[in-house]
Image: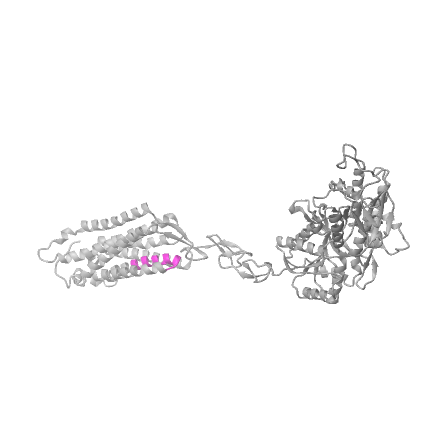
Amino acid sequence: MVLLRLLLFILLLEKGNSACQLQGLAQPPELTQDGDLVIGGIFSFLFVTFINNYSFNFREFQFAQTMIFAINEINKNPHMLSNVKLGYKIYDNCGTMDILRAALTLLSGLNRELGEDSCTETVQAILGHSGSSPTIAFAQVVGRYLYISMQISHFATCACLSNRKEYPTFFRTIPSDYYQSRALAKLVKHFGWSWVGALAVDNEYGFSGIAAFIQAAKEYGVCIEYSEAFSSSDPPNRLQRIIEIIKQSTSKVIMAFMSHREIKLLATELYKHNITGLQWIGSDAWITDHSLTDSEGHKILVGSLGFTSPKAKISGLEKYLKQLYPSQFPDSQFFTDVSELRFTDNVYKSVYAVAHALDMLIKCDNNQLSFSNGSCTDPKNINPWQVSDWERVYFNKNGDTPARYELVNLQFTIRGTMEGRTIGIFDASLPERNQFIMNNIRVVWGSGLTEVPVSVCSEMCLPGTHKVLQKGKPVCCYDCIPCPEGEINSIHCAKCPPEYWSNKQRDACIPKEVEFLAYDEILGLVLVLFSLLGVFLTMVTTLVFYCHRETPVVRANNSELSFLLLFSLTLCFLCSLTFIGRPTKLSCMLRHTAFGITFVLCISCVLGKTIVVLMAFRATLPGTNVMKWFGPLQQRLSVLVFTFIQVLICILWLTINPPFPFRNLLLYKDIIILECDTGTAVGFCAVLGYIGLLAISCFAIAFLSRKLPDNFNEAKFITFSMLIFCAVWITFIPAYISSPGKFTVAVEIFAILASSFGLLFCIFMPKCYIILFRPEQNTKKHIMGKTSNYDIQY
């Protein structure tokens, strides 16, 4: 047994001649023993039942006998209070007024006059009472107004008693309810109960304890559905109203901060109304009370959880108790049960606390002067206020002991009674994260449940939804609303990073799908096939022209420009392939520049052929010699110059601000469009604008040549091809702007292929038809049939 060391602090009080006249006779003690120094005790052996009968409280009687046992043990100890005998005066009172009368009797020494010279038979300290409310009344009168005795309680846990201004001489060997309330709130949080009811006894103990619990519960995110208070002396309708509240509530966990009398009354009424399925959380005032089994509805309380003082062992106490009146208490197993001694140990420590204080006070020497006059006290003449002056104990500044509890679970025993089985501990002196520890003992839950009960106002939101508080209700009550697209979480919907998107369950951010025109998709595959088809047809046309290069149809259409045009068309079909596939820095630069240069080369050839046709027939006019200004050399130079200009534009574009791969996050919410940014719109517009300028020029010249002789003139085919070309690219602009994502690229490829096929079919297919299927028309005579007999050399 760890002994408490006390050194009582000095209260500098001015002695005065005050006297108190007791009204009526002083109350005699129930148990008494003379001594040089006397310690008083106030307990409640008898209590009034609900039907106004008296019943014997064996636990309170055990407290009193433990006090006597400790005093006798100290008297036998030669090393403590030598030559000084401790006595005791123990009173049995169950009402507040009776307790005050007993306390004043202890302080008055059974004399009718209470004054400075009549204190030789007064007590040096008072132990008790067990209840907080009587203790508060006693402490206010004795400690605050009289300042004449120290009071030590073994069971009064109300946090209000820690107020040193109100209760300067009050101490206790049980922790304050402040720590118990916080431990209970942490217990509720540990099991995930966020929606609980709160009940309290209608006195200072209940109000103070439940208020501290509610405050701590709020800090841990626990909501209180209701908070009610009642006492065993209230009219029946008060209790019935609380029963109705419990019946209609949705919380399945109830915090009961009350005494054993109120909880037994409440359990009985709940049992009568067949209200089950509740998980009880109890305060230490009832959680281990053996009398719970006496109530009709005690089964309602099986599985209750609560904190109480740790178990203790007092050597020799069991033998002492069993020797007391064995014939008078044949069935008093509670009286002789010393298996736990949770609160009985507090009585034992209280006695030793006072004894050590007295011992140190008596043994003081000239180097440890007791009082301001420089003298030590007389062991035969120690005033009660002097005991209080030297206190030094393991209490904090408020007179409270360090808080350490055991978590108990009410379970049935083989005898049919209930006992609290230890399933964990709480130690407030440890760091926050280590204060509450559970052991591996199986927990019995209320109503026979095999799993932890669930008590929530609203079920936890599923992943992908967020909480929206219900109007007028606590924060634990909410509706679960699906998160908007692109947001996740189960509390507050949070947006995913820019390149991520919420999954279907809205519980995780996943990378957005990256979209581009790929070779392995249907659209890309179709465009590749058409591109290769164009290359194939162009090569077939080239082969046909090459095999018939000496025929009039080929020669009459400027074969050199025709072969160069077929080569440029092949490049046009091939350049469309650079637009398909994952964009890279190289492919982005290549696709636009290759497209621009090849198409300028193609249009330059067509433009050259158109000019040749026009100049040839201008040369038939008398005195005209224009062909020398646009012969084969000039034709080659014109194509080279027109193409070189486009090459310069592309070089400037790539040098200043080239195209680059770009991840477009704005077009779609859940898709990333991987595309080629043009870098600068000026460069892209310059390339297209130059192609458009050449195309319009070619169309204008071809249009001017439309009335030349039919058989020799290909101007009508060039006009039609350029009409298709211009129409395609004019419609391309709005389609390109309005097409989303990869379809933008598809539109550009379509424009390239459509214009290329237009040039190929309109310019070369008629001639291939004549070469292959109408060879009789492939003669000089037929070609020149409707023209002058002028022969033009190419």
Colour style of the rendered protein structure:
one colour
Front residue of 296/236: it is: 236
Outermost residue, front side: 17
Left or right: residue 742 compared with residue 97: left
Q: In this rendering, does residue 475 appear at all?
A: yes
Drawn side of residue 767 relative to residue 735, left or right? left
693 vs 370: above or below: below
- On the image, the x and y values in percent for residue 31 come to 86, 50
Quadrant containing the N terminus is top right
Q: Is residue 624 left or right of residue 189?
A: left
Give the residues in magenta.
739-757
The quadrant holding residue 782 is: bottom left
Q: Residue furthest left?
A: 623
Count the marks: how many? Answer: 0
Q: Is residue 535 magenta?
A: no
**Depicted 123 relative to depicted 242: above or below:** above
Give x and y (percent) for residue 195.
64, 59
Q: Nearer the viewer, residue 457 or 283?
A: 283
The image position of residue 117, as x and y in percent, is 82, 44
Q: Main secondary structure of the magenta part?
A: helix
Name the residue rendered at 83%, 60% in the picture: 54
